[in-house]
Image (spheres, helix red, strand yellow):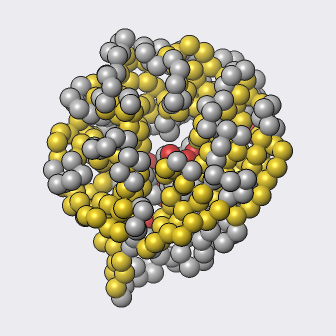
């Protein structure tokens, strides 16, 4: 198939080193196994035992929660969730980015990805994988319902043991635009999307998406996925969570000449993606059919070197109030190696900021350390957040001048960054 890009307490350094070595070995093995599926999942893992596990397995016990009653988030106050792979059973750490204060931690399960946070209400969700004997034994997948104010678990919804695990991606799950449904990426290694009705608190079914992966919400009853042939597949559902229609946006990108990163970010009705070589692709979801808008080239190449988007983890961010796209960039060798280009495995050393209205680069932010995740707060004078899987901190940066305002310890192995700004 054509390629598709898709706590405060630190662990002892020796243990962290062992964890990282194991993760690298595991990731390399899975990269080879998943080569036929292209880069849809990056380093995604499919548990081979999934098909042999009873989906009606006993309810999991309460997960570890390190929290206290959270303070009320003030208007304009900027909080951030940061994932932490830790020792394999992951967690998400909540901090106040304006003060550096640690607020709480929730356990997210084996290679947990991220919380899914509705726009309103008193709960949020974690889609977790758990095994009876830690890293082996009977597997249970569940969508946990967590209290937004205390971080305590209030309930759970069992789902089939098919949720993708491996290198985290922001688009491995998504809430529908009205927060009614939760869409989950399944990988067995067949690709499909699990549908959870959050209002009824039940799993309602699975939608086949062969050859396509990642989930981007496109309305209250629609999502789309990226496909290995260079297209995008949009699926519409009804109020019961059942598929009622599907259509494809053809020729979104060229999978043979310039594969697409799957780490899309959204601003209103527009989804932004970048290719390996830095072409910005925009998908408009406002109409009945997906529509591709004119993008621009964010990368720069000369001979066998060039500035291209950084690693696949979280290399894009968008600030709505200023209409700016942030791209994590790396100065990389473009010479073919290992049977392919593999540009996407370079950590970013700069963040390039683009005015989305004019496709003009407004500035380049040089980073103090190489990073593989970026995000921005969604306010008029935003914070830029960066982290690296190999350093236990979250940097809060002023994007106007590139100065590091503060560094916050967020765990041993930081992953995805999720800003939460109260407007």
Whether residue 80 is visible, yes or no, is: yes
- Quadrant where the N terminus lies? bottom right
Q: Examine the image and state in which quarter residue 304 appears.
A: bottom left
Camera-nearest residue between 2 and 15: 2
- Identify the residue shown where x is 37% and y is 11%: 69
Measured as percent of width and height from the top left, residue 18 is found at 35, 44
Whether residue 342 is visible, yes or no, is: no
- Quadrant where the C terminus lies? top left
Count of number-bearing discs:
0
Camera-nearest residue between 186 and 285: 285
47 lies left or right of 111 = right
- Identify the residue shown where x is 36% and y is 88%: 303
Measured as percent of width and height from the top left, residue 239 is found at 78, 32
Measured as percent of width and height from the top left, residue 17 is found at 31, 45
21 lies left or right of 393 = right
Measured as percent of width and height from the top left, residue 212 is found at 68, 57
Residue 12 versus residue 312 in the image, above or below: above
């Amino acid at each position: 198939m054509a390629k598709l890009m898709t706590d405060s307490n630190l662990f002892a350094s020796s243990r962290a080193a062992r964890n990282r070595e194991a993760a690298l070995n595991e990731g390399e093995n899975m990269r080879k196994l998943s080569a036929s599926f292209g880069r849809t999942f990056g380093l995604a893992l499919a548990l081979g035992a999934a098909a042999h596990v009873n989906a009606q397995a006993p309810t999991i016990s309460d997960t570890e929660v390190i929290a206290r009653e959270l303070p009320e988030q003030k208007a304009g106050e900027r909080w951030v969730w940061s994932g932490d792979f830790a020792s394999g059973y992951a967690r998400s750490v909540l901090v106040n980015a304006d003060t550096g204060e640690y607020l709480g931690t929730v356990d997210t399960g084996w290679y947990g990805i991220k919380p899914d946070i509705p726009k309103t209400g008193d709960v949020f969700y974690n889609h977790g994988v758990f095994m009876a004997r830690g890293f082996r034994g009977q597997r249970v997948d569940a969508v946990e319902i967590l209290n937004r104010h205390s971080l305590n678990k209030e309930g759970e919804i069992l789902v089939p043991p098919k949720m993708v695990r491996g290198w985290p991606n922001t688009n491995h799950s998504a809430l529908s635009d009205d927060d009614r449904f939760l869409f989950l990426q399944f990988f067995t290694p067949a690709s499909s999307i699990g549908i959870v009705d959050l209002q009824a608190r039940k799993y309602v079914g699975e939608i086949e998406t062969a050859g396509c992966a990642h989930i981007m919400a496109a309305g209250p009853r629609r999502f789309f996925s990226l496909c290995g042939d260079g297209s995008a597949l949009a699926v519409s559902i009804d109020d019961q969570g059942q598929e009622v229609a599907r259509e494809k946006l053809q020729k979104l990108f060229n999978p043979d000449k310039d594969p697409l990163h799957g780490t899309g970010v959204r601003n209103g009705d527009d989804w932004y993606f970048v290719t390996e070589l830095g072409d910005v692709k925009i998908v408009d979801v406002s109409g009945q059919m997906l529509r591709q808008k004119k993008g621009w080239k964010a990368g720069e190449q000369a001979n066998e070197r060039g500035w291209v988007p950084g690693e696949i983890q979280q290399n894009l961010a968008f600030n709505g109030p200023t209409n700016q796209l942030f791209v994590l960039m790396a100065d990389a060798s473009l010479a073919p190696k290992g049977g392919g280009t593999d540009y996407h495995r370079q950590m970013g050393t700069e963040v390039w900021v683009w005015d989305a209205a004019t496709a003009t680069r407004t500035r380049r932010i040089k980073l103090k350390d190489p990073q593989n995740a970026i995000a921005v707060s969604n306010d008029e004078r935003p914070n830029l957040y960066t982290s690296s899987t190999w350093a236990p901190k979250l940097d809060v940066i002023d994007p106007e001048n590139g100065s590091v305002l503060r560094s916050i310890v967020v765990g041993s192995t930081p992953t995805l960054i999720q800003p939460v700004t109260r407007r």
